[in-house]
Amino acid sequence: MNEGYFDGSMPRAVLEYYLSRAATAQWIYLSDTLDDDIRVILKAGIKFLGRASGIWKAEMPDEEHFALSRAAAEKIHAADPEIILQACIFEAVYREDLESTKIPARVFEAFGMEPEDRCFSYDACTLIPGGNMPDISRTETQLWFYYRGISYIDCGYEAFHMGQIHLYSARDRGYRAIGRVIGMLREYGRLHARRHKVLFDAHSHSLVVNGVSLLDYNAMPFTRYPVLDRPGERLVLVREGKSGGGISPEGVYEKALPFLYEYDNWGGKDHWAHAYLTTEERAWAQWWGYDQIAWFASQEEEARNTFLDYTFKWTAVNNPDGYFAFPLRRPLQSGEEAEGFPFYKLNNRSEACPDGFSQEDTAAGLLRGGYEKYRALANPSDLLDYGGRDVDDPETGVRLPEKVVLYGSFQPYVGAVENDSNSEITRMYYVGDGKYALAFVMPYAGEYDFGISTWGTLSACVSEHGGCPYSGTGNKSKLEVPHDNTVIRITFTYMTNAITIDVM
């Protein structure tokens, strides 16, 4: 049986089969290069297309929207029926959309209500009068979410991105309302979805009620740290939080659910930041004065390819439960107006796709290679449990330190402050037998230095020089990084002060 097969149930191994072959294909149902997009999808072996359909604000009448969504799904599934298409139900509602859309009788009936001949009410949906944030605790909003969900399922979509779920559930005590809607959509999917199963994610590290996760996996954009001592608008990625655990929708306890990273969009280029901020100020203004995908698209082609490679390796090393949704198609503006190309496209630039950004070969190579060889050096799955708590050396009875920090000149290139001996970003993990380890990706070749701070202070540091502890920031070891995007793991044995460096 194909490892991507599922029908009604999806074990974690099958879910990870799709997440490990994921790409964001935002609004691909509107793509004017769909044939070339499908060529890239097949070439790269992409199996999960995130954000493939959805609305933000009044793009077109709903009847037309769903007809186009269905047509695109049918065409993509004709090319590869295994692909999962994801639709979006966002944290935004607009009067134009709701008050021009009739509520189907079956939606009322699903909630045990008498059908009415009316459109959705914008005022009955919003969290704040006049605002665009929906309030899921209100029945009208639940009707709207359910209507959109079953309509996408009918069009062949098998996954949902639920946006910034913690915002519109602010008044939903105990997540009862959003839990109800997701549960109803799961049941509808069990009966009517292509393979009798629908998946849910949202921008969340965890959404667990009574021990059970409402989501199949968690998803978040990346976090960055700007680099100011390199030419151009450089940045590195920063580990932030972890994916929470709980009983999965499949009924299996997971210490950490799968996690999906992406380059997010929210407004494109910030023209004010570029016009009025200094270089240093703009470095900290979002991603150098852009949203994430617009920053990425603004880099030179070689730099984009290198950053994709870095992101893939960074994800594998820093979150063994995490996966990277490659940007197949992502808007480069807020949706109000466009500058230059309105979308980033992974496609190689050609007559078939004159607005491609030419990263398809890099993405295809990384996806074919997979995550596993980098996972071999990955940090533990529970990224906030560093271990070593109440652990004693069996021979001497010496209490091992709970906190051990790797510090030095390399730290800014992994998102930490240089020479910060108390950093949580470069804190090492206890791996047993008196050993601590940390793996990371160095995006730039060169010579750096490092030391190991036991207990997170400068009063008892260790380097490779003689194996004796020292005090202060001097006497650190050298770290030779042979090429860009080098994967490194440093292991430290507390009782012997032995240090091992693995380089890939």
Image (cartoon, grey):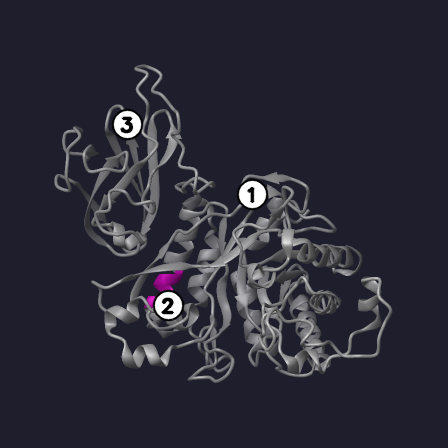
Specify whether residue 48 is painted magenta.
no
Q: Which residue is mark 2?
A: 286
Residue 464 position, x and y percent, is 18, 34
Looking at this view, name the residue that lies furthest to the top: 395
- Which residue occupies 65% across, 67% down? 79
- Pick whichever of labels 2 and 3 is earlier in the sequence: 2
Q: Pointer 2: residues within 10 angstroms few (<14), some, or many (20+)?
A: some
Q: Residue at x 27, y 70 (%)?
A: 281
- Name the image quarter holding the C terminus: top left
Residue 134 visible? The answer is yes
Label 3 neighbour load within 10 Å: few <14, some 14-19, many 20+ = some
SS at badge 2 = loop
The count of marks equals: 3
| Amino acid at dot 1 | Gly
Bounds of the magenta span?
Answer: 303-308
Q: Position of residue 481 (x, y in %)?
A: 24, 49
Label 2 amino acid?
Answer: Gln
The kind of secondary structure element at disc 1 is: loop
Between the residue at mark 2 and the residue at mark 3, the CA separation in whole angstroms equals: 39 Å
- Which element is circle 3 on? loop
Q: Which residue is mark 3?
A: 494
Check contact, mark 1 vs mark 3: CB within 8 A: no
In terms of depth relative to the viewer, which is nearer, 439 or 243? Answer: 243
